[in-house]
Image: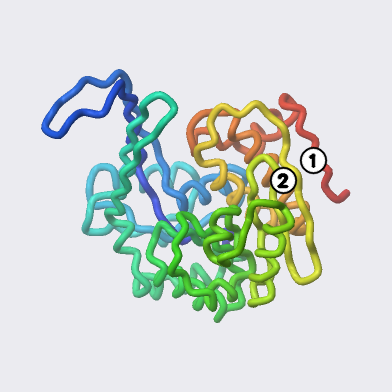
Amino acid sequence: MTYDVTVIGSNMIELSTNIDRMPELGETVAAPKFHMAYGGKGANQAYAAAQLGSKVAMISKVGSDMLGREYLKHFKESGIDVSGVSIGKESNGVAPCFIQGNMNSIIIVQGANSELTPEVLENYRNIIKDSKIIVLQQEISLETDYKAIEIANGYGVPVMLNPAPANDHIDIEHVAMCEFYSPNETELGRLTHMPIKTLNQITKAAHKLVDLGVKNVIVTIGSRGALWVSKNEEQLIPSYKVEAIDSIGAGDSFVGAFVHYYSHGDNISDALKHANAYAAVTVTRRGSQTSYPSANEFAKLKEKLGIKELVTA
């Protein structure tokens, strides 16, 4: 079987509680609202690509608890191939989030995600080999990411590394083995140790990574759009102006949409325009995965929002 997209990464259950105030140590307080949702950067990206119609495989570890069973069921119902999803010994990864006004306090519990080790990937070489593109993030161990890059390179499969959350200890030699490196400007600055306040500075920092071997650097820069830098290209793909109500998961929707369109034959520039449009639509809806529209919904929402993509005819 050939997969359009294979995502190797995390899955998390988001546990969001609206609070009036944080309790003191040893205190119990009442809270007005609780919400549970499927999240995790890897799972978000896989879900976005699957929503758009890609044949997606996920390589991940779910927990041995009720939440793990629910996430495995969710993957299946979303049309994501779970041949690479196994059940760990730990509980499922969770992200309890406490929302007070417009401020968040978040706790990350990796749970079974910590069991997605480099050795586990040896069991799924065939999935990696039969994929058009591999997508990685940094909510799993860097060593697992490195192993995935090495296996994919061995089979000539391109890799997109989304370096979130940022990690100052990442190995630049493995970054240089990726076809696509997609940081935001802050993550780019942390890796290159260069200033990133202006577009010119961001471009120079991206070129530094290209000089080190990365074929394509795609920097997401918020409302300004996405900057694509390669050896022969330097292109700013502007964002689409919409009334945003919730930006949670927008970066993951961008990655998932980009790899969907790229794996279906779009050139990089057009895939980025589609990805910008998809991310723009998601920020007009609430939640992460709950804001990711299907291909049919995407077309209708673009028309409703007045988004016109100027892609190659």
Q: Nearer the viewer, residue 199 or 257?
A: 199
Numbered tag placed on residue 274 in the rendering: 2
Residue at disc 1, secondary structure: loop
Q: Position of residue 159 (x, y in %)?
A: 58, 67
Q: Up-down: is 212 above or below 189? A: below
Q: Up-down: is 195 above or below 280? A: below
For badge 1, the amino acid type reads Glu
Residue 200 horizontal side relative to residue 249, left or right: right
> Which residue ends up furthest to the left in the rendered image?
26
Q: Is residue 6 visible?
A: no
Image quadrant containing the N terminus: bottom right
Location of residue 130 by image quarter: bottom right
For badge 2, the amino acid type reads His
Q: At x 44% / y 27%, what residue is drawn?
A: 102
Q: At x 82% / y 47%, what residue is drawn?
A: 311
Residue 122 horizontal side relative to residue 26, left or right: right
Q: At x 62% / y 59%, what residue is drawn?
A: 195
Residue 196 horizontal side relative to residue 128, left or right: right
Q: Position of residue 190 (x, y in %)?
A: 52, 61
Count of number-bearing discs: 2
Numbered tag placed on residue 309 in the rendering: 1
Location of residue 37 by image quarter: top left
Q: Nearer the viewer, residue 122 or 203?
A: 203
Residue 70 horizontal side relative to residue 278, left or right: left
Q: Residues within 10 Å of mark 2 (few under 14, many from 20)?
A: many
Q: CA distance from mark 1 to mark 2?
A: 7 Å
- Badge 1 vs badge 2, beta-carbon distance below 8 Å: yes
Q: At x 29% / y 56%, what residue is drawn?
A: 112
